[in-house]
Every structure is written in C-alpha cells, then in structure tokens.
Image: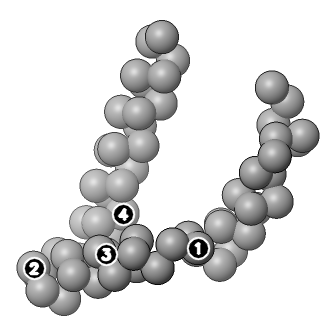
C-alpha cells in the first residue's frame, strides 16, 4: 500500500506533532517516570525497542 494514500496518513502526521490521541499512553509514561523513577529518554528507548521488534516480526512474515 502506498504510504501517501494510507487511511491514517494525516493522523500519523498529526501524531508526530501533537503526540498520541490516547491519553492512557501519556498516563503510563507519567507513571513510569514519576512513580518508578525512569527518565523520559528511558521510556522513549523502551518504545523504540518494542516498535523495532514489531517491525522485525511483521517483516519476517
């Protein structure tokens, strides 16, 4: 599927600027940072690892 015509293209562009729409994501990040002492950069690194693993799994199919 062409990425320019994907149904979520505009939402993805907005996500990069405004962040995720689901407030639960922000709440979970805040819990990890404020309640468990992680740094925001650590949470971002965790997100990167998980997304990279998902991409690898999708590309292996």
Farthest left residue in view: 36
In-image side of 7 versus 12 (left or right): right
Q: Which mark is residue 1?
A: none
Whether 50 is drawn above or below 41: the answer is above
Question: Where residue 12 sits in the image (x, y, percent)?
Answer: 71, 58
Q: Residue furthest top?
A: 61
Point 85% across, 30% down: residue: 2
How many neighbours does mark 2 have within 10 angstroms: few (below 14), some (14-19), or many (20 or more)? few
**Marks 2 and 3, the one that precedes in the sequence:** 3
User: Which x, y percent locates residue 30?
Assistant: 29, 83
Q: Nearer the viewer, mark 1 or mark 4?
A: 1
Q: Which mark is residue 29?
A: 3
Residue identified by numbered label 4? 44
* Residue 21: assigned label: 1
Is the residue 60 above or below the residue 38 in the image? above
SS of the residue at dot 1? loop
Q: In the rendered structure, which disc, 4 or 2, sits on the residue that comes first in sequence?
A: 2
Q: Nearer the viewer, mark 2 or mark 1?
A: 1
Q: Could you tell me if the residues under marks 2 and 3 are in contact, i.e. CB atoms within 8 Å?
A: no
Q: Which residue in the protein does label 2 denote?
A: 36
């Amino acid at each position: 599927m062409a990425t320019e015509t994907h149904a979520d293209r505009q939402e993805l562009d907005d996500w990069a600027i405004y962040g995720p729409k689901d407030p639960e994501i922000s709440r979970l990040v805040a819990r990890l940072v404020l309640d468990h002492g992680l740094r925001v950069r650590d949470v971002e690194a965790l997100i990167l690892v998980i997304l990279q693993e998902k991409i690898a799994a999708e590309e292996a199919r």
